[in-house]
Amino acid sequence: MQETAWWQHGVIYEVYPRSFQDSNGDGIGDLKGILQRLDYLVKLGVDALWITPFYPSPMADFGYDVADYCGIDPLFGTMQDFDQLLQGIHSRGLKLILDLVPNHTSDQHPWFLESRSSRDNPKRNWYLWRDEPNNWQSNFGGSGWEWDDVSGQYYYHSFLKQQPDLNWRNPLVRMAIFEAMRFWLDRGVDGFRVDVIWLMIKDDQFRDNPPNPSYRAGQPSSHRFLSVFNSDQPEVHGVVSEMRAVLDQYPDRVLIGEIYLPMPQLMAYYGEDLDGTQLPFNFQLLQTPWNTEALARAISEYHSALPAGAWPNWVLGNHDNARIATRVGAHRVRLAAMLLLSLPGTITLYYGDEIGMTNVFIPPEIVQDPAEKNEPGIGVGRDPERTPMPWDSSPLAGFTTGRPWLPLGDDHASLNVAKLDDVESILNLYRTLIALRKSHPVLVTGELRSVAAINNVLSYERHGEGERLRILLNLGDAPIPLESSIGEIIAATSPHCLSEQPNKLIQLGAAAGVIVRLRT
Ligand code: NOJ
């Protein structure tokens, strides 16, 4: 069997802590709550948790506005709770990945308070200050520049004005963030997912971005210009490899990068000589239309673009994108699970997708997400995919005893973990498919071959570790005949998806898939 590191063969599970489990009745999930649910994750079979930010924060962007890189926000608990959680994670053989947010701080971070206090403050140059704004936009709408009355200059923020961007050209900023990384690594965390890593360095001449010729009214205002000068700058790769060097001083840790870029630019984040992130997140499955041709193309293109020795990874959902069940339809979530868990490399799952959670409608008067508040009604809001995890059929779904910070889905009485414990549930399909990656390592390490879209069927093969598997996914609405002699079916999206016809032909049902071990 090919030797692989934990972050290579493992399945990573993203926990959005506000919505996972509340332990103190304030309606917001917390660290103690996560600890209470670890055995659920063990039974699911995942290997690592990535927990999105829980550092002290004014919560303007729900924790992505960090006011102290080395603390815990009281909303989520204490440092003692953190240590207990980490211990609980490690004692179960799981790993913990933290979210590192180095592109920007909160405007309440002591560094920024100092920086804005006067033009000659030693920390002035820790952020991006200018006399005149250019045309760079905030990703949450409007200009990215905010006027500061006190010191009489503008500062740049890629996101909210409460999230000023750090100046990564300043070596002192690098040192400060690397120190925060060491703080957590020394405490025992197993790696970082780095927030918006591709935005970290901006053009040193602050040139205006060119207009986006395909911009249409109604799109987010940040799409008005092409982000030529405020994202993916050549110098960013130097920063990434410095971060990696910090990590490499500790054994067996992982650096994951959040990157929304086209394929060739994305691949550059593996680094020259693979000294960048080990896993630049691959968001193909979030962005590709759900049809066989588009999926086959995305899968093949990703694999042929991988640099030599680079480890692949696949993501199906996260806290910034509509849930998979909503994107592809509830009747196709099983197919999506089989697709995700039969692709090569590291898999990242978003909490709740394993039970088929859908986006929850959030009426305008209770919107929480600043992205939606800034640009209402154009579909940029992320509350719908961040709603509380339904654990059981009790009135508040076992998530809290208080008032949940976002509403539970209307379907929580029927769609919840306790209800889905039967063998035929989507939850059990996830458990089975995750276990299959362990019993058939070819699914993790094997070569990907023969990716094809034939009408409504997406098919591909995995070769290695002494076996050959073929995956057949019927994305269509009609059953399709299968060659009955091709091999042994080792997994199916549901026990009823195969039917024998009078003429002895086997049919694969609509929106169903199988994994077949080919005869050698
Ligand atoms: C990406 C994070 O995933 C998102 O939730 C956040 O709002 C922005 N970065 C800003 O930190």
Image (cartoon, rainbow, N blue to C red):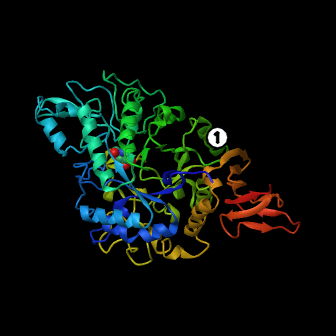
Point out residue 400 in the picture as x, y percentages from the top left corner. 33, 72
Q: Residue furthest right?
A: 503
- Residue 371 visible to an observer of this rendering: no
Depth order, front residue of 35/358: 35
Q: Residue furthest bottom?
A: 394
Left or right of 420 on screen, residue 38: left
- Residue 203 visible to an observer of this rendering: yes
Q: Amino acid at mark 1?
A: Ser
Relative to 130, residue 390 above or below: below
Q: Quadrant of the N terminus?
A: bottom right
Quadrant position of residue 504: bottom right
What residue is at 41 percent from the left and 78 percent from the top?
A: 394
Does label 1 point to a residue whose CB lies under 8 Å from ligand 1?
A: no
Relative to 268, residue 470 above or below: below
Left or right of 104 on screen, residue 251: right
What residue is at 44 percent from the left and 76 percent from the top?
A: 392
Total number of numbered discs in the rendering: 1
Q: Residues within 10 Å of mark 1 (few under 14, many from 20)?
A: some
Q: Which residue is mark 1?
A: 300
What residue is at 42 percent from the left and 53 percent from the top?
A: 319
Depth order, front residue of 109/416: 109
Left or right of 452 on screen, residue 205: left
Quadrant position of residue 441: bottom right
Point out residue 151 in the picture as x, y percentages from the top left corner. 12, 31
Query: Considering the numbered disc 1 on the image, is that residue within a helix, a strand or a loop?
Result: helix
Point out residue 260 in the picture as x, y percentages from the top left corner. 46, 39
Q: Quadrant of the C terminus?
A: bottom right
Depth order, front residue of 235/478: 235
Point out residue 255 in the picture as x, y percentages from the top left corner. 42, 45
